[in-house]
Image: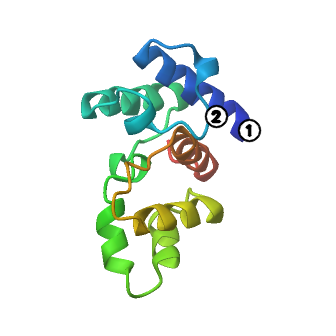
Amino acid sequence: MRTDQTLSVVCALIAGIFECPPETLNARTRLMTDLPCESIDLLELGAGLNRAFRIDVDDELVFLRSLRVHAERFRHDGLEAGLAAEYPHLSRERIRELAEGLALADAAPLLRIGDIAAYAAHALEQGRA
């Protein structure tokens, strides 16, 4: 499945959960800031990813749950390299954006729809079903 197809499926899943038109969503849409997303919605989304793609869903990875913990761990010793090792599904550009966002003292939640689509695409490539 191509990346744009994966993103389309993820947008459709999220649109169903939040009852909004899928065309209003894109890779840069932030779940916790742009949508009224709560932890229960993430559970529903994880289950939807499992059904739609037939992949195992690791909530820690897909929803970047430990991002700030990892950032603190790697703060003095290669933040971008450390985050890239923890989140192999994210592009170098996205890792750089996350590192920059974490540097802001009042950084809003950083999870985007594109991060979730990247996780699904990576899992499909790796055959993690």
Residue for point 42% across, 69% down: 103
Return the x and y of residue 94 as percentages of the image width and height.
59, 58
The residue that mark 2 highlights is 6
Q: Residues within 10 Å of mark 2 (few under 14, many from 20)?
A: many
The image quadrant that residue 5 belongs to is top right
Q: Mark 1: few, some, or many residues within 10 Å (few <14, many ≥20)?
A: few
Relative depth, front residue between 70 and 34: 34
Is 127 situated left or right of 40 in this image?
right
Up the image or down, 62 lies above or below 26; here it is below
Tag 1: amino acid: Arg
Residue depicted at x 46% and y 25%:
51
Relative height, residue 76 to residue 39 (above, below): below
Does residue 43 appear left or right of residue 123 in this picture? left
Image coords of residue 104 (percent x, y): 41, 64
Q: Quadrant of the N terminus?
A: top right
Q: Which mark is residue 2?
A: 1
Q: Are marks 2 and 1 in contact (CB under 8 Å)?
A: yes
Res. 6 image quadrant:
top right
Eyeballing the image, is 95 above or below 54?
Answer: below
Q: On the rendered structure, is 55 left or right of 28? A: left
* Mark 2, secondary structure of its residue: helix
Q: Where is residue 31 shown, x and y percent of the image?
A: 43, 36
What residue is at 51 percent from the left and 47 percent from the top? 128
Q: Is residue 29 visible?
A: yes
Query: Label for residue 35?
Result: none
Secondary structure under tag 1 reads loop
Q: Nearer the viewer, residue 110 or 6?
A: 110
Kind of residue sitting beneath label 2: Thr
Task: Please give the name of the residue rendered at 53% of the width and 38% of the height, measured from the top-left corner.
Answer: 113
